[in-house]
């Protein structure tokens, strides 16, 4: 096992923050079961130029789900709950869509009910104008929202993953009713306190009283807009924490449920949390699956990687761990820019002695960046622009129109293939890298890249 290259990791984080205008990132890296690197990058408060630290609080989004799963696991250990109990044993739900739905199904997102969008509306409405409004302030309100869900299920329980935030809200309520305490109070006493996570919170009074909270930012183009802290995600994504606290959490997971000689959860429960129950709909690394509040990559260069990311739009997060290597990483940010999950897997790659530049998503990113720019046909008769947008390219040009989506379709040493649609027909688009630089072949035209993307906010070509 090679030693973790902290400088390469730091350079990578800094470069991606600079590229995507992320205000700050807080990170902690665990190697050989010890925190070997922890630091803050950038500003927790850009306007005040206040730097972030490993103690700075961020929203962790859906990383919260792993904590809820752990709380359920503690109740299973004590005999007050079983993973295969019907959820209606703990939560009064009258909708037929929940018939046959077990705690297991909600934990693994296999209830058969697709995402209903309530948490997204609550979050978006908290910090920007949004077209919809949902007054969900209690479990009873959630019950009202769920009226009418009976015809929304699309598969039988257990058949496949449909990511359901609302399912974890129900699990939070189930933990509350089974334990006799609010789910977060139960989590705090059973998990957070033994892990010495003294700065991990859910409620606004605790968060408002803390002096080291990252300002959340909406990033729209080149503009950073500070927003209120988005409360209301509850058990689906409402926890706020810091890299220092989460490094204790990840250390416990790496150590099979133990922390500083204390057993927090049994390895049997952790094994159930880390069991792949259904295929994840996005396959990035091969065999990606979902367990209980955790994503599983069964074979990443010979190692099992367990992870989860989170986003509440103005905060993003990621945790990763590899038990057999004794390694893990925590990443938190106060904006949506570069993927914390991809940074996390880059860190895992470095921990395992693998070149992160060989990650499929990184290679695609590198290719798309190489192809961006301004292009011209013969003697500059027509001009076009190619822009990178997420995992595809957008082409706009004179005579051909605006915002033509180019989808990656394969790459060789000197050629990158894409496709688009022309009406109902599929059309191949090819980029060639040759002695002329980069050339684009689109329908009847041959373009040659003439320079980098000019600084304009949007394409203005006539349709």
Image (tube, rainbow, N blue to C red):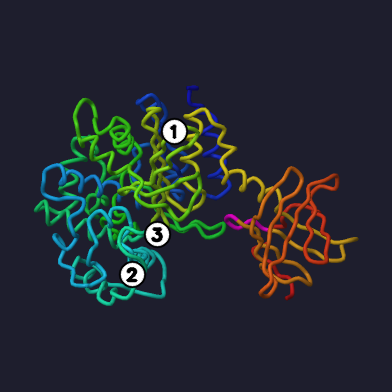
Q: Are marks 1 and 3 in contact (CB under 8 Å)?
A: no
Q: Quadrant of residue 177?
A: bottom left
Residue carrying label 1 = 303
Which residue is rendered at x = 56% and y = 45% of the image? 18
Q: Quadrant of residue 422?
A: bottom right
Residue 3 part of the magenta segment = no
Q: Which mark is residue 227?
A: 3
Q: Secondary structure at mark 3?
A: loop
- Taking the image as shown, residue 207 lies to the left or right of residue 183, namely right
Which residue is rendered at x = 62% and y = 57% of the image? 392
In magenta, the rendered stretch is 387-391
Q: Nearer the viewer, residue 142 or 290?
A: 290
Whether residue 159 is situated above or below residue 422 in the rendered picture: above
Q: Nearer the viewer, residue 179 or 135?
A: 179
* Mark 3 vs mark 2, CA separation in Å: 35 Å
Residue 389 part of the magenta segment = yes
């Amino acid at each position: 096992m090679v030693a973790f290259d902290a400088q390469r990791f730091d350079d990578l984080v800094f470069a991606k923050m600079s590229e995507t205008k992320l205000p700050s990132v807080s990170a902690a890296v665990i190697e050989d079961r010890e925190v070997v690197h922890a630091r803050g990058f950038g500003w927790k408060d850009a306007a005040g130029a206040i730097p972030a630290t490993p103690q700075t609080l961020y929203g962790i989004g859906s990383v919260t789900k792993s904590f809820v799963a752990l709380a359920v696991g503690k109740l299973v250990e004590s005999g007050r709950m079983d993973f295969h109990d019907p959820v209606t044993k703990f939560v009064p739900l009258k909708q037929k869509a929940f018939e046959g739905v077990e705690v297991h199904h909600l934990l693994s997102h296999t209830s058969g009910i697709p995402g209903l969008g309530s948490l997204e509306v609550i979050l978006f409405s908290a910090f920007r104008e949004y077209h919809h409004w949902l007054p969900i302030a209690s479990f009873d309100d959630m019950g009202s929202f769920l009226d009418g869900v009976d015809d929304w299920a699309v598969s039988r329980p257990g058949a496949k993953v449909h990511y359901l935030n609302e399912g974890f809200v129900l699990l939070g309520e189930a933990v509350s009713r089974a334990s006799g305490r609010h789910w977060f109070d139960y989590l705090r006493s059973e998990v957070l306190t033994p892990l010495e996570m003294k700065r991990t919170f859910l409620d606004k009074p605790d968060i408002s009283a803390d002096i080291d909270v990252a300002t959340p930012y909406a990033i729209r183009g080149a503009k950073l807009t500070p927003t209120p802290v988005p409360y209301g995600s509850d058990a689906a994504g409402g926890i706020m924490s810091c890299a220092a606290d989460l490094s204790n959490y990840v250390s416990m997971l790496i150590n099979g449920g133990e922390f500083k000689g204390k057993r927090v959860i049994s390895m049997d429960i952790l094994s159930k949390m880390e069991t792949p129950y259904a295929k994840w709909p996005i396959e990035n690394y091969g065999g990606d699956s979902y367990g209980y509040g955790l994503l599983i990559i069964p074979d990443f260069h010979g190692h099992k990687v367990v992870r989860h990311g989170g986003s509440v739009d103005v905060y993003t997060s990621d945790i990763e761990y590899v038990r057999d290597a004794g390694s893990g990483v925590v990443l938190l940010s106060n904006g949506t820019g570069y993927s914390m999950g991809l940074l996390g897997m880059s860190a895992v790659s470095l921990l395992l002695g693998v070149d992160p530049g060989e990650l499929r998503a990184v290679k695609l990113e590198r290719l798309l960046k190489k192809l961006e720019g301004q292009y011209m046909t013969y003697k500059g008769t027509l001009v076009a622009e190619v822009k990178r947008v997420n995992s595809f390219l957008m082409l706009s040009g004179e005579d051909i129109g605006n915002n033509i989506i180019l989808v990656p379709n394969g790459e060789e040493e000197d050629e990158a293939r894409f496709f688009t649609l022309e009406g109902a027909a599929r059309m191949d688009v090819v980029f060639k890298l040759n002695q002329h630089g980069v050339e684009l072949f689109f329908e009847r035209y041959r373009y040659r890249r003439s320079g980098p993307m000019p600084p304009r906010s949007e394409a203005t070509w006539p349709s």
